[in-house]
Image (tube, grey):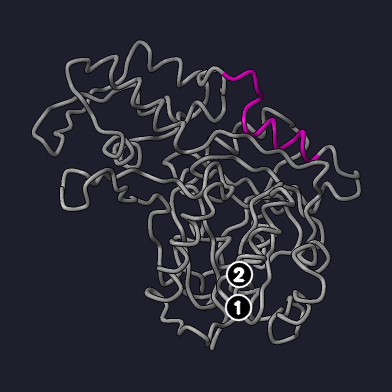
């Protein structure tokens, strides 16, 4: 039985048996609904549904909920049999706390009784997915942005940057902007998410964005409940916030400036291999105009250095940017488990959870 690869994000959990040239078999919301009993068990009104987020800003926060979610994924979704559990590989977000890594490996061996475990950082895996071992990843997730230089398969942590903003913050920004021009209309946040995916785009440059103040075509959109809203300049604000974080109320440099500052922290002899292998990850990077704006901002940052964006190999699925960490994990699983580089049950029993820091890096 092939190893299972799990990439648990703040918005979506992706899981499936290691098949690098295919999309993950399961892509499901990470958010869960839990029924809470309150009062008389015979009274149907005594049950209340509460929303639970097992993963917040990329890190597991609710371990009970995560256990429930993984039981559904592994046994119901992927068909594991109790007592015959296989091997599993997890993707690690940048700067995952040691205690989180230890708790995860402990849960896998002691609760799920896996036969083997491995974990690797998402930045490294995203590079594997495009056939690289060195480069720099920009991962715009649902709840965070990670910028990570990677040299010969090792994340340069001293130069890496993590920001606790992501797709959800851009969705909230769009909701605020839509309310300003459509104050009489209530729009559910899930619907705003869909509007972001449909309409959000990047202006060609800051001057073009500023120009939308004076002239921007309006587009009518009919919501599922029949209400009508108008969308104009809001579509550009979402993308602009990545290059001008002040729009989100943050005193930070834009995403391209952050990338250059990160790379310049690494030894100069490594700059070229990082600059020549930039990988964009996350659904937000697929926004219309994002790559073009990224390249234009890069020229403004440095006239002498032109970053090169790595294009996915033709044999990989089209939406690689959305699933690159999972696919890189599937590639790695084909190596670490057959070559016995993973953590075995015997090794875990002998050393305990701390072994994850020695064998998974």
Would residue 74 be found to the left or right of residue 342 on screen? left
259 part of magenta stretch: yes
Could you tell me what secondary structure mostly forms the magenta stretch? Answer: helix
Question: Residue 278: horizontal and vertical position, in percent?
Answer: 67, 50
Question: Residue 46: horizontal and vertical position, in percent?
Answer: 21, 44
Q: Dot 1 lies on which element?
A: loop
* CB under 8 Å between discs 2 and 1: yes
Residue lying at 17% horizontally and 16% vertically, measured from the top left: 184
Would residue 340 be found to the left or right of residue 333 on screen? right
Residue 78 lies in quadrant: bottom left
Residue lying at 64% horizontally and 81% vertically, measured from the top left: 334
Q: Residue furthest left?
A: 226
Q: Dot 2 lies on which element?
A: helix
Residue lying at 54% horizontally and 17% vertically, measured from the top left: 249
> Circle 1 is placed at which residue position?
114
Q: Which is more toward the observer, 157 or 47?
A: 47
Q: Nearer the N terminus, badge 2 or badge 1?
A: 2
> Circle 2 is placed at which residue position?
108
Residue lying at 47% horizontally and 73% vertically, measured from the top left: 16
Q: Which mark is residue 8?
A: none
Provide the residue span drawn in magenta. 250-263
User: For the residue carrying disc 2, how many other residues have a C-alpha within 10 Å: few (<14), some (14-19), or many (20+)?
Assistant: some
Question: Residue 327: horizontal and vertical position, in percent?
Answer: 55, 68
163 part of magenta stretch: no
């Amino acid at each position: 039985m092939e190893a299972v690869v799990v990439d648990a994000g703040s918005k979506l959990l992706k899981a499936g048996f290691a098949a690098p040239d295919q999309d993950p078999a399961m892509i499901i919301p990470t958010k869960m609904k839990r029924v809470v009993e309150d009062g008389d068990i015979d009274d149907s009104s005594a049950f209340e549904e509460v929303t639970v987020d097992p993963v917040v800003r990329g890190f597991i926060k609710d371990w009970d909920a995560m256990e429930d979610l993984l039981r559904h994924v592994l046994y119901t979704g992927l068909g594991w049999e109790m007592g015959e559990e296989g091997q599993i590989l997890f993707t690690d977000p940048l700067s995952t706390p040691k205690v989180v890594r230890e708790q995860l490996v402990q849960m896998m061996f002691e609760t799920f009784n896996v036969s083997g475990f491995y974990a690797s950082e998402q930045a490294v895996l995203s590079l594997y997915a495009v056939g690289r071992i060195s480069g720099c990843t920009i991962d715009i997730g649902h709840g965070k942005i990670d910028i990570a230089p990677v040299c010969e398969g090792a994340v340069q942590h001293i130069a890496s940057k993590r920001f606790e903003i992501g797709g959800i913050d851009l969705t909230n920004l769009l909701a605020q902007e839509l309310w300003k021009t459509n104050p009489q209309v209530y729009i559910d946040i899930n619907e705003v998410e869909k509007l972001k995916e449909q309409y959000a785009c990047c202006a060609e440059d800051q001057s073009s964005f500023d120009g939308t103040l004076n002239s921007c075509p309006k587009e009518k959109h009919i919501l599922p409940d029949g209400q009508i809203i108008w969308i104009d300049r809001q579509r550009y604000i979402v993308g602009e916030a990545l290059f001008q974080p002040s729009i989100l109320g943050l005193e930070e440099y834009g995403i391209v400036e952050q990338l250059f500052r990160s790379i310049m922290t690494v030894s100069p002899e490594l700059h070229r291999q990082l600059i020549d292998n930039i990988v964009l990850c996350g659904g937000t990077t697929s926004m219309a105009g994002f790559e073009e704006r990224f390249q234009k901002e890069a020229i403004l940052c440095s006239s002498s250095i032109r970053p090169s964006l790595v294009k996915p190999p033709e044999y990989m699925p089209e939406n690689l940017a959305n699933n690159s960490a999972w696919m890189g994990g599937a590639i790695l699983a084909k190596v670490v488990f057959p070559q016995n580089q993973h953590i075995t049950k015997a090794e875990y029993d002998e050393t305990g959870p701390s072994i994850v820091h020695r064998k998974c890096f």
